[in-house]
Image: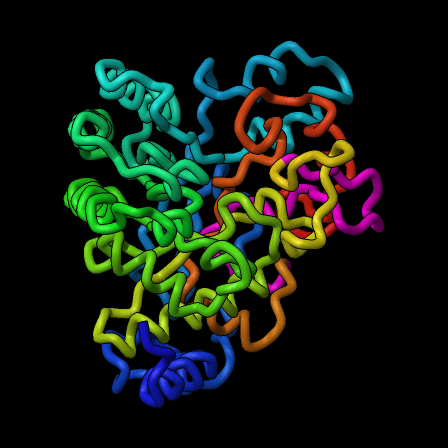
Amino acid sequence: MSRPSVARALAVLLLLTAPAVAPTTAAAVVPSGSHRAEPAATVPVWLAPAEPHAENPTNPLAHRLWGVYRGPQDQVWRPYTRAKGAKRSALATIAERPRTKWYGKYLPDARVRATVSDYVANSQAGNPETLSQMAVFRMVPWEGEACKRPTTPAEAASYRTYIQELAAGIGDAHTLVVMQPDGPFLLCAPDRAVKSELLTWATQTLSALPHTSVYIDAGAADWCEGGTAQESWRCAEILKLSGIQYARGFALDSTHYTGPVENIDRGMEIIAELVADGYAAPHFIIDTAKSGRPTMWRDMISATPRGLRNNARTCATRAMTRCVTLGIPPTPRPADPQWGLPEPQRQQAAAYVDGFVWFGRPWLYNQADPFVKKRALSMAASTPWTDTGPR
């Protein structure tokens, strides 16, 4: 693949000057002034719907409550309900905020429809306008194994069944879907074309639902491909291979620890790459569940000696560095002043970032399973953020 062309580089430069209206072609990219002054949201989105920023009027995550699932599908919920006193109050910082449920191969195909339907109904709590959130982590093989062997025909058939059942479980519910976290593993797959076809079909299938917004995982501010190949055109390639033309946009930082500012910078470069190649400019979401102390992957310290960075040590104090703690709470208004974004990232967030979303899971061991109460309590104590702004 060739290095970015002069036209692409120009599109990157122009987009980074913060367009006032999302462009659909490279020629439409124009610079603008600062983010428009407007009232900031003062109530969390899980308690009251929030209006979109004026620069992003089509934001599907605005105008509605974000639901909180309360039940056995959530690893946090049972420990939270059993806790008392100060520990219960601390765990509420996680349990009572909207988060994204991950669905993967551990849920049998035959149980997907009923399980997802139950999750949606619980999250909505009787209000059909409430937003549900889920991540589809179903591609087999994935992560390191995806670099070593192809998907078998049986696995591909099962994947299609799973996605069809997932779509049936979602139905007409207002739903945010993160498509295939850890997206950069697609680029190392020996059967990239097969996985690309499956992911594109899944993106198209779920995006065709009446109220579902799909955001394809594109890596993170410090991750587009394994090793040192981190140019944004590589992140954009993941999206092209996964059906970005059908999706609302893309998702950043599902499992890394970089902050909103760095991910906005990365997201704007990805958009410019796509626009330069003739795609409509997508929007994106950023995980902020674990970016209270933004840290590059290479700098993160594991919770145990010689352990995995996926299981990062938690921050014991608000001054501690190279550790993980809870970041900005979920919101569809990332450019509100209380979140402290500098210019020009605040301008760019107002136009292109549909939300800060908690689709990361730092309270789980290795960001997977099981729930670790000690981790959760440590992050609840050290986070620099409250529901509505800084501490």
Work out whether residue 16 or residue 266 is closer to the camera in this orientation and state it: 266
Q: Quadrant of residue 1?
A: bottom left
Q: Residue furthest top?
A: 82
Please give the range of residues in magenta: 311-338
In this rendering, position of residue 243 left or right of residue 314: left
Q: Residue at x 52, y 40 (%)?
A: 360
- Residue 208 at x, y = what percent? 15, 45
- Residue 352 at x, y = what percent? 40, 65
Colour mapping used in the image: rainbow
Is residue 252 in sight in this rendering?
yes
Q: Residue at x 32, y 62 (%)?
A: 237
Q: Residue at x 25, y 44 (%)?
A: 195
Q: Quadrant of residue 218?
A: bottom left
Q: Residue at x 23, y 20 (%)?
A: 113
Work out whether residue 334 or residue 366 is closer to the camera in this orientation and state it: 366
The overriding secondary structure of the stretch rendered in magenta is: loop
Q: Quadrant of residue 20?
A: bottom left
Work out whether residue 135 or residue 224 is closer to the camera in this orientation and state it: 224
Q: Decide whether residue 41 is among the magenta residues.
A: no
Is residue 61 in sight in this rendering?
no
In this rendering, position of residue 5 left or right of residue 40: left
- Residue 203 at x, y = what percent? 22, 46
Work out whether residue 209 or residue 222 is closer to the camera in this orientation and state it: 222
The vertical placement of 192 against 35, above or below, is above
- Residue 292 at x, y = what percent? 68, 49
How many discs mark residues in the rendered view? 0
The vertical placement of 186 against 40, above or below, is above
In this rendering, position of residue 127 left or right of residue 89: left
